[in-house]
Amino acid sequence: MIHSIVCKECGIEVGFDQSKLLACYGEDLVKRVITKPRRITEEYEKDLISFVRNIPFRIITKPYRIIKEIETFKN
């Protein structure tokens, strides 16, 4: 589980309070965000060529998709 992220460049650390995230955005979204690094690793280990081919598009569209999903929780 991710508890915090530290920038390798400047050393700034950003922590996560899972209970607050759960309250704001729902358990499913939080679990998906927290497990994303493991799921990405599994993807590229399974099929590296497909992963490399699709990752540029996914990197561009993921922030937009997350924002849209978070907006559904606000309503």
Image (cartoon, rainbow, N blue to C red):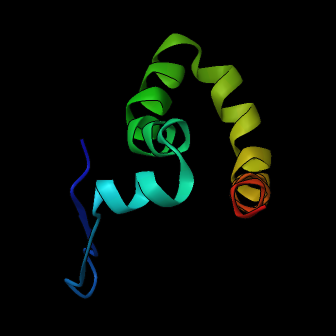
Residue 72: x and y, percent?
77, 54
Residue pictured at 23% horizontal, 63% vertical: 4
Does 3 sit left or right of 75 as displayed? left
Residue ranking furthest to the top = 46
Name the foreground residue: 42 vs 62: 62
Give the number of marks: 0
Task: Find residue 18 and report its image quarter.
Answer: bottom left
Name the foreground residue: 37 vs 22: 22
Position above or below: 15 against 60: below
| Quadrant into which the C terminus falls | bottom right
Does 17 sit left or right of 30 as displayed? left
| Quadrant into which the N terminus falls | top left
Position above or below: 15 against 55: below
Residue 48: x and y, percent?
57, 21
Residue pictured at 38% horizontal, 31% vertical: 38
Task: Find residue 3 and report its image quarter.
Answer: bottom left
Name the foreground residue: 36 vs 29: 29
Task: Find residue 71 and report its image quarter.
Answer: bottom right
Name the foreground residue: 51 vs 28: 28
Residue pictured at 25% horizontal, 74% vertical: 8
Position above or below: 21 against 12: above
Residue 54: x and y, percent?
75, 35
